[in-house]
């Protein structure tokens, strides 16, 4: 439906009004506007009544500003006053158009955006058609915006659905085993109930420290806020961490929860300050009230616990000699994995020269052998319990290489790498290949330690080989 347009102008500006009407002819032909001015009054009609009738019913009022317009009592005191009253009530849109230069800074319409661009009078343009074309384009945009339908209030059933609390799930995860004084990552995500959420993301991310089995979930309900049209809008939720055994001891971040999707992953960095079982509390807050919380538990160990070396154990062996005639001779001997240089063999049977034992089979020999086996097994078990360090970090179920590296292998490679990489830290710019080798060595060294801590020795061995390769490259350069 076309919008009615009213021209308020001085008859001394009729030529300029005709040019503007020509530029707006396409809008009229396309059925967007229906223009009217006092030249449309028929013979015998009351012109004052006709002007007032159209001025009170149109949707767009154009004020064609010039010195003569400002000087006209009818234009300034009647038409413009009525137009601005309807504009204030949002019954019509008033658009001032500056035709000729004049001082209108104190006019009642001075607060409205005027045309053309920068309110430069049309008469001052080198090409007046260009000015009128810009005015026509702006009026077209106003007409299109005016014709957009007003938002309809939502149906009662839709409104009831929008204000009904929707179920959501809080996912949080951090590694089940972490290292003292080494930063670790805690991840938080708010998901739909039927979404894989954080577990699915961790499953697809090989580099993540936490694993899918580390994810802990907490269901809760949320009511989304309504926008201007009544449609639900994303909800801003604040995630607060309380972690007294970590640095920092508390953190907070905001997450936007979409209406029909999972939120983005929100990461937090925490550095444990002590070893042992640790707890982090995660709390959700919105609308200035707590809405739910979840605790994450982890076990923190120091790196020195991983590098403990078991001492060498010496195993005592007791061979049994049985005399043919009189008595059984038991002669102890020892097995030493590291015999002294030039000494006797690692294991030997010493028999006194004066009494040569003659070994023989019999019930006595079998009983003595059984007793010795029991004593030896008990000794081994006692020594193993004595020298075993604190419970090791659980290993992953993944495959392990046959020649898997130990923590000692990694630290040995680290010392060798640091020897060749330290001299490179000088004011002289590093060669690209040297810088690349240093970066590769540092990254793979850290990755090897993490993989070994998680029990993935095969992956640790792969990173360790890359560290040694970087060391060889640095030695060449």
Image: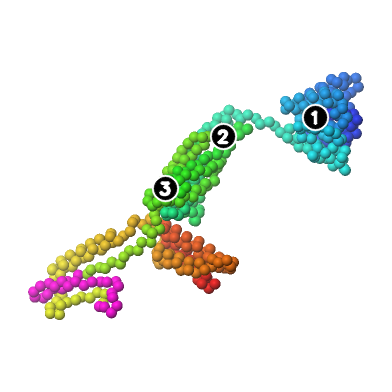
**Mark 1 residue element:** loop
Identity of the residue drawn at 45% across and 54% down = 182
Dot label at residue 107: 1
Identity of the residue drawn at 37% across and 58% down = 305
Magenta span main SS: loop
Magenta-colored stretch includes residue 340: yes
- Mark 3 or mark 2: which is in front? 3
Identity of the residue drawn at 35% across and 63% down = 309
Q: Which residue is mark 2?
A: 225
Magenta-colored stretch includes residue 41: no
Span shown in magenta: 318-344
| Residue 351 x, y percent position in the rendering | 17, 77
| Residue 465 x, y percent position in the rendering | 47, 67
**Mark 2 residue element:** loop
Q: Nearer the viewer, residue 384 or 371?
A: 384
| Residue 177 x, y percent position in the rendering | 41, 53
């Amino acid at each position: 439906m076309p919008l009615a347009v009213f021209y308020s102008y001085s008859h001394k500006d009729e030529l300029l009004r005709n040019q503007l009407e020509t530029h707006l002819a396409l809008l009229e032909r396309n059925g967007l506007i229906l223009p009217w001015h006092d030249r449309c009054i028929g013979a015998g009609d009351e012109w004052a009544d006709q002007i007032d009738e159209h001025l009170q019913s149109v949707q767009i009022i154009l004020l064609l500003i010039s010195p003569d317009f400002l000087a006209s009592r009818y234009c300034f005191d009647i038409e413009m006053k009525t137009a601005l009253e309807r504009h204030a009530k949002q019954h019509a849109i008033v658009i001032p158009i500056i035709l000729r230069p004049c001082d209108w800074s104190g006019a009642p319409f001075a607060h409205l955006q005027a045309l053309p661009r920068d309110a430069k009078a049309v008469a001052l343009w080198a090409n007046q058609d260009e000015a009128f074309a810009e005015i026509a384009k702006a009026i077209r945009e106003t007409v299109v915006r005016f014709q957009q339908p007003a938002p309809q209030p939502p149906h009662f059933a839709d409104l009831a659905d929008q204000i009904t609390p929707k179920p959501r799930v809080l996912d949080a995860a951090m590694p089940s085993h972490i290292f003292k004084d080494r930063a670790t990552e805690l991840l938080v995500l708010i998901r739909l109930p039927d979404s894989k959420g954080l577990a699915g993301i961790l499953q697809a991310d090989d580099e993540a420290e936490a694993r899918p089995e580390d994810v802990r979930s907490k269901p809760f309900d949320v009511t989304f806020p309504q926008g201007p049209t009544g449609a639900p809008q994303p909800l801003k939720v604040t995630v607060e961490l309380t972690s007294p055994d970590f640095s920092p001891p508390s953190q907070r971040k905001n997450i936007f929860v979409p209406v029909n999707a999972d939120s983005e992953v929100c990461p937090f960095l925490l550095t444990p300050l002590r070893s042992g079982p640790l707890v982090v509390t995660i709390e959700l807050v919105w609308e200035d009230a707590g809405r739910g919380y979840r605790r994450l538990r982890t076990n923190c160990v120091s790196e020195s616990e991983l590098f403990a070396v078991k001492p060498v154990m010496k195993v005592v062996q007791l061979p049994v000699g049985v005399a043919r005639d009189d008595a059984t001779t038991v002669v102890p001997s020892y097995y030493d994995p590291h015999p002294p240089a030039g000494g006797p063999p690692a294991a030997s049977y010493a028999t006194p020269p004066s009494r040569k034992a003659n070994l023989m089979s019999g019930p006595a020999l079998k009983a003595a052998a059984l007793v010795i086996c029991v004593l030896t097994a008990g000794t081994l078990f006692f020594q193993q319990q004595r020298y075993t360090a604190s419970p090791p970090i659980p290993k992953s179920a993944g495959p392990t290489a046959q020649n898997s590296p130990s923590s000692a292998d990694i630290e040995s490679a680290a010392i060798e790498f640091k020897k060749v990489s330290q001299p490179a830290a000088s004011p002289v710019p590093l060669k690209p290949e040297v810088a690349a080798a240093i970066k590769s060595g540092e990254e793979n060294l850290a990755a090897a330690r993490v993989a070994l801590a998680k029990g993935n020795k095969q992956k640790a061995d792969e990173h360790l080989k890359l560290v040694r390769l970087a060391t060889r490259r640095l030695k060449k350069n």
